[in-house]
Image (spheres, grey):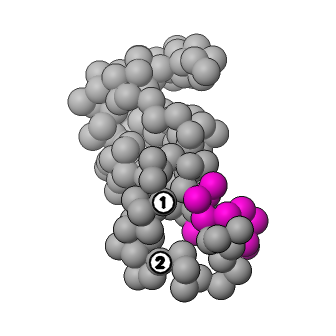
Amino acid sequence: TGGWLLRGRQMHAANKSNRRLPMRRSVVEEIKRILIDHPDETPRLAKLARAASLSPYYLARAFSSETGYSTKRFVYTLRMRQAFDDIVNGAYPTAQVARDCGFSELRHLNRALRLQFGFVPESMPGNRAYV
């Protein structure tokens, strides 16, 4: 953990001469990669902004402009996709999937899946809810 903070600063230093759109895209891509590589961590916006040597406000606006999501929503969406895939593939019991995807309780995962996809794990093919 935290090694990505140094990489972010190095990446920003390489792009410092051109602070316009191409740099913004590369910074957003780097932040997306960090979030994808570490979905179990939820780094604060301030920490991500430090990694990119940007203000939290600027990073939030740039990330949202490029992706259509806030960093928090982006991580949440990654976790939801992972949970959905794990449940459909029947890889793990639903309670374990909930824990692995950052949900404190199974009912939180159930509610999130119902809101996001329209159904709960018990009705999903391949589900091993009670194993």
5 sits left or right of 47 in the view: right
Q: Report x, y in % for residue 20.
A: 37, 32
Q: Nearer the viewer, residue 130 or 32?
A: 130
Give, as a single range, the part of the protein colored magenta.
84-97
Residue that numbered label 1 is attached to: 106
Q: Does residue 85 appear anywhere in the picture?
A: no
Which image quadrant is residue 62 in? top left
**Residue located 37% across and 68% down the image:** 111
User: What is the distance, in whole Å, between disc 2 and disc 1 at their CAs?
Assistant: 11 Å
Residue closest to the eye, 88 or 62: 88
Question: In this view, which residue lies farthest toward the front?
Answer: 130
How far across and down, in percent of the image, does residue 43 sit? 44, 30
Is residue 126 positioned above or below 18 on the image?
below
| Quarter of the image that includes the C terminus | bottom right
Report the residue at 38% width, 28% height from top.
Answer: 44
- Mark 2 element type: loop
* 121 in relation to 62, above or below: below
The image shows residue 1, relative to residue 113, as above or below, that is above
Residue 130 in the image, given as x and y percentages of width and height: 64, 71
Q: Disc 1 on helix, strand or loop?
A: helix
> Which of the two residues, 64 or 97, is positioned nearer the viewer here?
97
What residue do we see at 70% from left, 80% from top? 126
Q: Is residue 92 left or right of residue 21?
A: right
**Label 2: how many Cα within 10 Å (few below 14, some 14–19, many 20+):** some
- Which residue occupies the foreground of this view, 99 or 117? 99
Which label belongs to residue 120? 2
Q: Earlier in the sequence, mark 2 or mark 1?
A: 1
